[in-house]
Amino acid sequence: MRIVLLGAPGSGKGTQAQRLQARHGVPQVSSGDLLRDAVARGTELGLKAKAVMEAGQLVSDDIVLGLIRDRLSRPDAAKGFILDGFPRNRDQANALSALLNAIGQPLDAVLLLDVRRETLMQRLAGRRICPKCGTVYNVHSLNGVTTCARDGTELYQRPDDKEDVIAKRLEVYEKQTQPLIDHYSKLGLLRVVAGEGEFEAVFERMEAAALTKPVPAAAVRVSAAPVSTKKTVATKKKTVSTKTQPKKSRTAAKSAKRKATSKPAKRAVARKGARKVAAKRASTTAAPKKRSVKTASRSKSARRKK
Ligand SMILES: [Zn+2]
């Protein structure tokens, strides 16, 4: 499971990543954590990063890529990784691909945890954090309680969780992420996961998306078979394809099942927007129908002329 995780602040990607990590034994690799850790431990790259940050500059991609490379070479990353916070732009995405190819661990998928903007605003503005243990709460579920359930410490709201700051953070996120979405979509790696609803349901969708691997072109038999005009070869090919059919339909049934289980929840989330879209679609599909009626009558009259 080698994945990059994309999701807005408040999308819940952090907790989902933790769950994936616990269930599948792949580490969550956050570029921010890597940097902080390297600086704290005073490693070579950490010292470099510290100097850059203290000069008020951004840490270069080379340093972050170096940290990622080191992290992925540790034994716990043998089964894969969940990359979070990197890449943030197309150049970084390309550099990351080059690195992952060089170490023989190319990406399986890029997951985009999709949550509506108003939901993100609500979640983030309601966030309260315990300064002692770091537990995150939401005012909507606290019912007036203002202290941590674990240690009784007074909870606080992070300054960047204030509404106007959130709006800006989301704007930055959208601007930053759109090019990545386009990039990974073109590469066939993007999986959009509906991120609203019950945690468990979202996790199931995340897991399914993380485990679905794109089939490499070389592994597809039909296109790999050499083209030939000889009859005997053609009949041979036919028998081969019927033999493999049961297997194919079984996997097709599996994916259909998966689709069927994930659809209702997605639908519930998209219902509001879907209504609008459906209305739009109805108005746009009506036009071509009229046209086809016209062309039909035109061809009738054309035939009559003949
Ligand atoms: Zn606490």
Image (cartoon, rainbow, N blue to C red):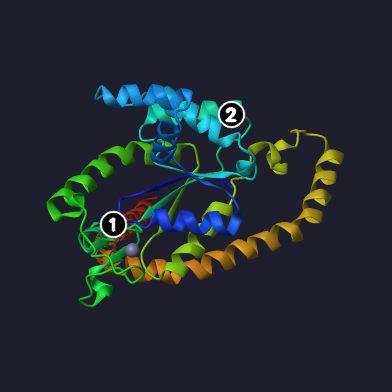
Q: Is residue 51 left or right of residue 246?
A: left
Question: Farthest residue toward the left?
Answer: 164
Kindly indicate the quadrant of the structure image that contains residue 63: top left
Q: Secondary structure at mark 1?
A: loop
Question: Farthest residue toward the bottom?
Answer: 143
**Which numbered dot is residue 101?**
2
Decide which of 267, 136 is in the foreground and name it: 136
For label 1, count other residues whose C-alpha is less than 10 Å away and answer few (under 14), some (14-19) or many (20+): some
Q: CA distance from mark 1 to mark 2?
A: 41 Å
Relative vertical location of residue 256 with respect to residue 7 in this rendering, above or below? below
Of the two numbered discs 1 and 2 on the same chain, state the one appearing first in sequence. Answer: 2
* Rendered-image quarter of ligand 1: bottom left
Relative vertical location of residue 32 with respect to residue 121 in this rendering, above or below? above
Q: Total of numbered circles in the picture?
A: 2
**Residue at numbered disc 1:** 131
Q: Secondary structure at mark 2?
A: helix
Residue type at numbered disc 2: Asn
